[in-house]
Amino acid sequence: MNTNALRSLPQIDTILRAAEGNPALTEYSDVQIANAARAVIDGIRADILSDNGGQVDGTIDTIIIEIFRRLAQDSVHSLRSVINGTGIPLHTNLGRAVMPECVAEQVKLAAMEYTTLEYDVETGGRGSRHSHVESLLCQLTGAQSAMAVNNNAAAVLLALSALCHGREAVVSRGELVEIGGSFRIPEVMEQSGAILREVGSTNKTHLRDYAAAIGENTAALLKVHTSNYRIVGFTAEVGIGEMCELGRQRGVSVIYDVGSGDLTGSIFVGAGSARLSQDTTPRNGRVNPYPTTEPSVREGIAAGADVVLFSGDKLLGGPQAGMAVGRADLIAKMKSHPLARAVRIDKLSLAALEGTLRLYAAGKEGEIPTVAMLSATSEELRERADALVAILPQVAGLEYSVEATMGEVGGGSLPGVELPSWAVAIRPVPTNNHPITIMELEHHLRTRATPIIGRIVRDTYLLDVRCIERRHFAEIGAAMGAVGL
Ligand SMILES: *Cc1c(COP(=O)(O)O)cnc(C)c1O
């Protein structure tokens, strides 16, 4: 052990005096600088004690540089923006839907200014948080009444608690799904106090199964869209129309959790790969011949569902939120249930939700990034990939090309639907004894201040351009320019 080296380490006070007025450190507080100085000294001391003392440079200048490095590293926000090169528009781990600027402006206003959140400007008295989106939701879905809560998981919990507590909710065994790890329909039902009455089998449930299960204590028939998987082969599922007919005849409500919530039936997946609704009207000259796999909210209401539940940040393309739309008396029960307060939507999400719904109401849903990404055509994506590859700087040992890829929608929406897309493909030049591997490239891009998230397929790094905007090109160029530096 090098006791001399230990003894000659500068005192914290000496370091702080030397750092005083250093322009690189002006944005940090004295406390931050002192804490960083202590951490640096502790690190050097540990190195000396572990007999790495020979390599340790304990001069004041080196220590100050190290302090700056640490402070700069710590000041990077943990929750920060990334560039999504996965080709998955609703990537749950990357925050699902992103907002257009006009919606983000409303969020900014709601964040910086006082708002009419629960204030009625006509009466000068208390207003309702629900008032800001209720009429929009009714208009867009055809429902009588509506409310928004924290997310769809909360909407399901609240609906079951308010409408089925202590009574039975009848569900098909084929619909007892798990969504996103901790959200399982049977467990949510237990939490809500509703009694789960399972009917049918995993692959087949018939109307007679529901009919036979209805009794004195039945509160509702529950239909859950199996968002994140598909059962294929020998299957039977009862449509929402038939279930609603049965519910009407027997006097029990029908609750329909549609999950993703295609709102207007106008989201077309581009490139002719799939269509998200039953609506066959061509939009923007695009007709998609494929059958739908996502139910629309309006269809659920039109079929007679008493309450339809859906997410704000899946196909809708809005903020994290959960919507309940349907019969006024049932929605009123949900609004006044004690849990409603615990799962209420916050003002920033509410601002974003109103902004998003207004775009739908104005027929401008094409401005919503999720909708635009899903409906981008193959030609548009190809052009974008060509434009991106054109601005990337050459990197020794790596070569670029533009290639066709397959993405998916993500967020537990449209399972099994592939999104044909285009990507910038990066791979080592075969003849070069390339200094950088694809794994190293992926790591380099992922660990930058603005992480770039792509995919490795065999020995190729792929940046799918579906979720990459032209405003991201410069950052990607800079990142490639910094490869190996
Ligand atoms: C995604 C989903 C949920 C949960 O919605 P969140 O908004 O993520 O809480 C519930 N039910 C179904 C059918 C879903 O697809």
Image: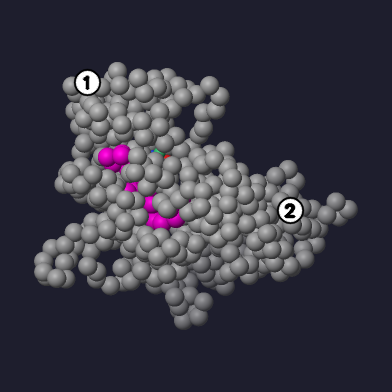
Please state if 399 lies on the left or on the right of 413 as rendered.
right
What is the crowding at mark 2: few (fewer than 14 residues within 10 Å), some, or many (at least 20)?
some
CA gap, disc 1 and disc 2: 58 Å
Residue 176 percent location from the top left of the image: 39, 28
Residue 316 percent location from the top left of the image: 43, 53
User: Which amino acid does the dot numbered 2 rest on?
Assistant: Glu
Q: Secondary structure at mark 2?
A: strand
191 falls in the magenta region: no
**Residue displayed at 44% across by 75% down:** 27
| Residue 112 to residue 304: above or below | below
Residue 466 percent location from the top left of the image: 60, 56
| Chain part drawn in magenta | 304-323
Mark nearer the N terminus (1 vs 2): 1
Residue 124 percent location from the top left of the image: 11, 70
Q: Quadrant of ligand 1?
A: top left
What is the crowding at mark 1: few (fewer than 14 residues within 10 Å), some, or many (at least 20)?
few
Please state if 185 lies on the left or on the right of 381 as rendered.
left
- The residue wearing badge 1 is 215
Q: Are marks 1 and 2 in contact (CB under 8 Å)?
A: no
| Ligand 1 neighbours mark 2 (CB distance < 8 Å) | no
- The residue wearing badge 2 is 403
